[in-house]
Image (cartoon, helix red, strand yellow):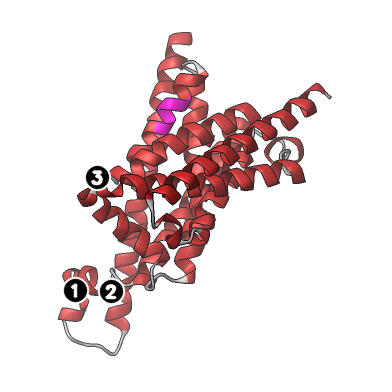
């Protein structure tokens, strides 16, 4: 019986991610069908305007349409994985899931998230000259979110919906199942590895793996998913606050990386110190 439960939990480590990919397909197919129907009902009567090939090459790639797909995808994630998480963990709304909402803790989580973003950007600026080709796809990805063609809807998707959806998926479900069948440290690494691969870009995937370990550690130690969500939202939003001119020289890049690392580590240390005092009470 115990062996069956272990096997089931091992399988369940990967099931949420597979379902996430299926939900992405649903969002994309639904969007293409919607565009096709809309074109058929419009005044534009040419057959070419209604072909799948034209839809994918023209309508589908429009910035606002990409934003709509992202919003739809993350809303699906939040609904499906949110219900799954609450069924799995059954957290108390007052003392469990939202128990971490206290000013000092929230401040340290936000500070850690902002420092984390500055640390990532400074390290990427340092290694960029060494991996120019690898950064090409990553730069396109960032431009879709923060570039001149991005929309407010895309910002909502990436800065607010994505952190909630991804934390429910990876730290809510994947980490929970992993901890049921292996030591916590290994479980944190496994979910972080899946989190990195999920991003599908070598640059983003590498730092997502490292962030996955950090956020997994935060969620594990606080036993509260909202800690990961808060950190993740602060990290994503603060990408808009990082001045590009900050990394004009190697000295500024190294200095920013060192200061950010100290602030990140200090914030997490103080966060855990507060949590330990609360636990003793």
Q: Residue furthest bottom?
A: 43
| Horizontal and vertical percent position of residue 217 | 54, 29
Q: What element does badge 1 sit on?
A: helix
Instruction: State the residue at coordinates (62%, 27%).
Output: 221
Total number of numbered labels? Answer: 3
Please tell me the numbered disc located at residue 59. 2
Q: Identify residue for label 3.
A: 130
Q: In the rendered structure, which disc, 1 or 2, sits on the residue that comes first in sequence? A: 1
Circle 3 crowding by C-alpha within 10 Å: few under 14, some 14–19, many from 20? few
Q: Relative to 70, is 56 above or below? A: below
Instruction: State the residue at coordinates (71%, 41%).
Output: 105
Q: Nearer the viewer, mark 3 or mark 2?
A: 3
Q: Is residue 255 magenta?
A: no
Circle 2 crowding by C-alpha within 10 Å: few under 14, some 14–19, many from 20? some
CA separation, marks 1 and 2?
7 Å
Looking at the rendering, the stretch of residues picked out in magenta corresponds to 188-192
CA separation, marks 3 and 1?
38 Å
Please tell me the numbered disc located at residue 54. 1
Q: On the rendered image, what quadrant is the C terminus found in?
A: top right
| Horizontal and vertical percent position of residue 93 | 72, 41
Please tell me the numbered disc located at residue 118. none
| Horizontal and vertical percent position of residue 244 | 43, 61
Q: Is residue 190 magenta?
A: yes
| Horizontal and vertical percent position of residue 231 | 58, 44
Specify the quadrant of the image occupied by residue 57: bottom left
Q: In the rendered structure, which disc, 3 or 2, sits on the residue that comes first in sequence? A: 2
CA separation, marks 3 and 2?
36 Å
Find out whether the residues at labels 1 and 2 contact each other: C-beta distance under 8 Å.
yes
């Amino acid at each position: 019986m115990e062996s069956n439960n272990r096997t089931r939990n091992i399988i369940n480590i990967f099931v949420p991610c597979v379902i996430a990919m299926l939900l992405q397909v649903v969002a994309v197919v639904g969007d293409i069908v919607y565009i096709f129907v809309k074109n058929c009902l419009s005044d534009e009567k040419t057959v070419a305007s209604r072909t799948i090939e034209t839809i994918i090459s023209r309508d589908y790639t429009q910035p606002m349409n990409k934003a709509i797909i992202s919003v739809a995808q993350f809303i699906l994630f939040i609904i499906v994985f949110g219900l799954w998480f609450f069924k799995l963990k059954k957290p108390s709304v007052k003392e469990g899931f939202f128990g971490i909402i206290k000013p000092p803790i929230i401040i340290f989580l936000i500070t850690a998230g902002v420092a984390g973003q500055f640390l990532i950007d400074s390290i990427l600026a340092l290694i960029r000259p060494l991996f120019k080709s690898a950064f090409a796809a990553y730069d396109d990805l960032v431009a879709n979110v923060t570039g001149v063609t991005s929309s407010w809807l895309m910002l909502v998707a990436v800065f607010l919906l994505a952190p909630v959806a991804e934390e429910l998926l990876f730290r809510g479900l994947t980490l929970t199942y992993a901890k049921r069948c292996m030591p916590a440290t290994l479980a944190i690494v496994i979910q972080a590895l899946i989190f990195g691969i999920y991003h599908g870009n070598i640059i983003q995937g590498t730092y997502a793996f490292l962030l996955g370990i950090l956020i997994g550690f935060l969620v594990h130690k606080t036993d509260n998913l909202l800690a990961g969500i808060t950190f993740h939202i602060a990290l994503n939003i603060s990408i808009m606050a990082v001045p590009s001119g900050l990394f004009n020289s190697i000295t500024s890049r190294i200095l920013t990386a060192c200061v950010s690392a100290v602030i990140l580590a200090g914030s997490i240390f103080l966060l855990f110190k507060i949590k330990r005092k609360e636990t003793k009470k």
